[in-house]
Amino acid sequence: MTEATELKESAAGEAGFIDRPRHTCALGGALYALRALPRTVPVIHASPGCGYNVFSAVNAGAGHLGGGYCGGACWSSSNVTEQEIVFGGEDRLREQILTTMELLDGDLYVVVSGCMVEMIGDDIERVASEIKASPAPLLAVPTPSFRGNSSDGYDIVLRGLFEGLTRKGARRERGLVNLLGLIPGQDVFYRGNLTELGRLLGLLGLKANTFFGEGETLDSIRRAGRAELTIRLSDVYGEGAAGFLERERGVRSVAAPMPVGAIQAAEFLRAAGEAAGIPKRRVDRVIADEEDRYYDYLERAADIVNDIDLQRYAAVVADVNYAPAASRFLAEELGWIPVLAAVTDPLDSEAKARALSRFRKGAGLPSPEVRFGVNASDMFRFWREVQRPQPAGGRYRNPYTPGVLVGSVYERELAEEAGWTLSVLSFPATNRVVFQEARAGYNGGLSFASDLFASLVSGR
């Protein structure tokens, strides 16, 4: 696989529009990060429909996530009209903030903005700073769509929260570790993933500050500046927020990509243990105990895998977090043969190079062809590009079959064209309801394998 092939971009993605996007705008990423924080009330300063459009897209796409507390269809919004666009919308925003505080009980209020009010120059931070009678902390974070997509909105709002709710010079809290890089909603399994990774860090004697996991409170945001370490579970997401904590609050940051399955979980534990100064003997003991339990479950599938030959070709269409992790899991743990991995984020050349480095493989294991593209239609082109050519003059082909396509609901037609089984992992995932399920770590690997095998034996 040549470098030119590896870094091949989606030509359509450079044309200025995206066919069936897999992200919302920055406002959407900010809103769903806030939705995942307990008793947090967003106040949207934007045109009518912005909040509801985000809700209708992410609610279904994230495995029917729901509106949350004072969220979704109940989000507070200024709904600026032509009058505010001409004469300015700051008075309307001030009225909306005060009304929201009167009617909606929250422990934190956060004003976020859409593109229209930013274009006319409304200063949401100044308006928020002038309100003195707030019953709870009030922050304002500009999140117009032209600042990026949902991953950028997640990063922007987290940095704003850290800046507003943490303080310089705070005493370090021994063993406290921040986890960044899993975007609520954008990662359909974010909550289960954070719970599992927090559990693993707890086995090392560390306290995971997941912000959006089970049992978290707003105190997790305030404690972020007291952590000894930030682990960024992504090469792309959360860079700005982690960088702020490192520069302004003195919290060291390391990258340890989200692990799927036992092999990657062991790598994650070793990286976290080394960064946190945990003795290697303790880390190895945790890994050994977890692997005993993990493989005791996984070996249950050995008979059916061998009896009816459940080895498959595989393709993965997912974001920069899942595409490398899922591809490695399929090859290294299930023994499948990945032929294609499509990364669906808009990435610059440096981020692409980092993503490519994550597609490591063990000795003798196959490696997928890696493509980068943001359009759903690109995936058909990528699939046809990696097909085995028919021998000249030959009557027979050796196609990639049978196979499993791991992607989103957008890949349903592609799976039908290939004659493969579709397993939905990435956003949008409108065909499943997700509760506490995970894909990260040991428990997530077991859940992922169970889903994959179930899709292959469901007709028996």
Image (cartoon, grey):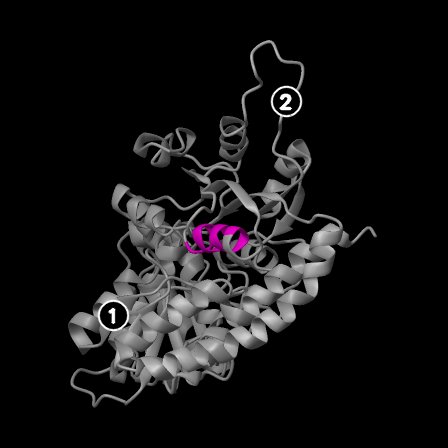
| Residue located at (56% from left, 11% from top) | 392
| Residue located at (72% from left, 59% from top) | 303
As helix, strand or loop, the secondary structure at mark 2 comes to loop
Q: Residue furthest top?
A: 393
Residue 327 magenta: yes
What residue did someone put label 1 on?
253
* Residue 286 higher or lower than 42, as above or below: below
* Residue 444 higher or lower than 211, as above or below: above
What residue did someone put label 2 on?
397
Q: Does the image show residue 100?
A: no
Using the rendered view, name the quadrant where residue 337 is placed. top right
* Residue 189 higher or lower than 70, as above or below: above
24 or 295: which is nearer to us?
295
Residue 455 magenta: no
Neighbor class of circle 1 (other Cα within 10 Å; few <14, some 14-19, many 20+) is many
- Distance of label 1 from label 2 (alpha carbons): 50 Å
Main secondary structure type of the part rendered in magenta: helix
Q: Which mark is residue 105?
A: none
x then y, percent, for residue 90: 32, 63
As helix, strand or loop, the secondary structure at mark 1 comes to strand
x then y, percent, for residue 188: 54, 61
383 or 127: which is nearer to us?
383
Please name the amino acid that badge 2 sits on. Answer: Arg
Neighbor class of circle 2 (other Cα within 10 Å; few <14, some 14-19, many 20+) is few
User: Upstream in the sequence, badge 1 or badge 2?
Assistant: 1
Please name the amino acid that badge 1 sits on. Answer: Ser
| Residue located at (21% from left, 83% from top) | 167
Q: In the image, 15: left or right of 366? A: left
39 or 299: which is nearer to us?
299
Magenta extent: 321-331
x then y, percent, for residue 1: 37, 33
